[in-house]
Amino acid sequence: MEPAATLRDFSISFWIPTAVLGIALVIKLPTIIRLWRDPLLRAVGGLLLLACGVFVFCSPSTIARVNRLTGVSNISAPWCYSLLTAFCGSCLLLIITWRNGPDRSAVTRRARRWVVSVYSGVIAVLWLLFLLADVPVERLRDLDTYYATTPFMREEILLYLCAHALACMVTARLLWNWVRAEGLDAWLRWGLKLLGAGYVLNLIFDAVKLVAVGARWAGGDLDWLSTDLAPPIAALSAILIAVGFILPHAGQYASDRWRVRVAHRQLRPLYVLMRTSAGEGVPFVLRATPELRLTRRETFIRDVLLPLARHLDTALG
């Protein structure tokens, strides 16, 4: 099998990153709803939702369906570019919120407004360029290279790639700076590393696309870079970003549960001894959580030891 065919088969897995991103969103959603006023959580939720939308609407089957429903050939192009551009803006908003925390200073508000204004303007220009371009032939996989030399569409393709690359470059740089900070939780540090790697892969995606488009401008043909190599790179980057968001939450949760179970197990010898002397133990509860079991065991041991308190000389402590 040819390498290009292998990459094409792999690139059909648009739904794999969609599923992983969806899982990340579902995990974060209860916290986002509960703490809706937190701008950081809202930014994370918006980013994950837009990332899911990018992969759903950029899959060839969805592109064909949208084109057919609207009756406009290639209408999916500006729509997908707009989703990707909105994702870029959400990345920058997330970083601004992360860096400044709850700070609502004039500088922070101005930075947020600047990001929203610039990327909203980019989206508006993308649609204007599409209206001016002549793109009658529907292309499901190779639109970027097929129309790379078409007036107005050429500028649209370059605009969305540059906007995406700029946002990913800034985000990756700030993430790597944050990784080197001291005092970070281990799970958070690994999550940031995965996020950084995901955004670096996004930059590679942009570079591959730009090389393929540039080859068309020069009269060459490197379409396979855009059609067959770029999609799996984007899929892998999305998976890394999703796992980067999941890992700190899931890792901390798993660590806490593990510590509770270890503490519960370590208290067993003392619990068995106290139960022997007391004649009874803690009543079994079928649906008790590990935290509740640990609390009940600790409480039982303290209650059994309580009568011994009058025999202790606290002055010796």
Image: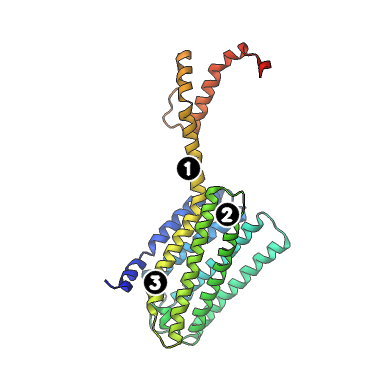
Outermost right residue: 106
Q: Would residue 61 appear left or right of 275 to someone viewing this image? A: left
Q: Earlier in the sequence, mark 3 or mark 2?
A: 2
Residue 254: assigned label: 1
Mark 1, other Cα within 10 Å: few <14 / some 14–19 / many ≥20: few
Q: Residue at x 47, y 38 (%)?
A: 258
Q: Residue at x 54, y 60 (%)?
A: 46
Residue hosting label 3: 229
Mark 3, other Cα within 10 Å: few <14 / some 14–19 / many ≥20: many
Which of the 4 image quadrants contains residue 212? bottom left
Outermost top residue: 311
Q: Is residue 34 above or below residue 17?
A: above
Residue hosting label 2: 41
**What secondary structure is found at the residue carrying circle 1?**
helix
Q: Is residue 289 visible?
A: no
Closest to the observer, 149 or 316: 316
Q: Would residue 310 appear left or right of 131 to someone viewing this image? A: right
How far is mark 2 from mark 1, CA to CA? 21 Å
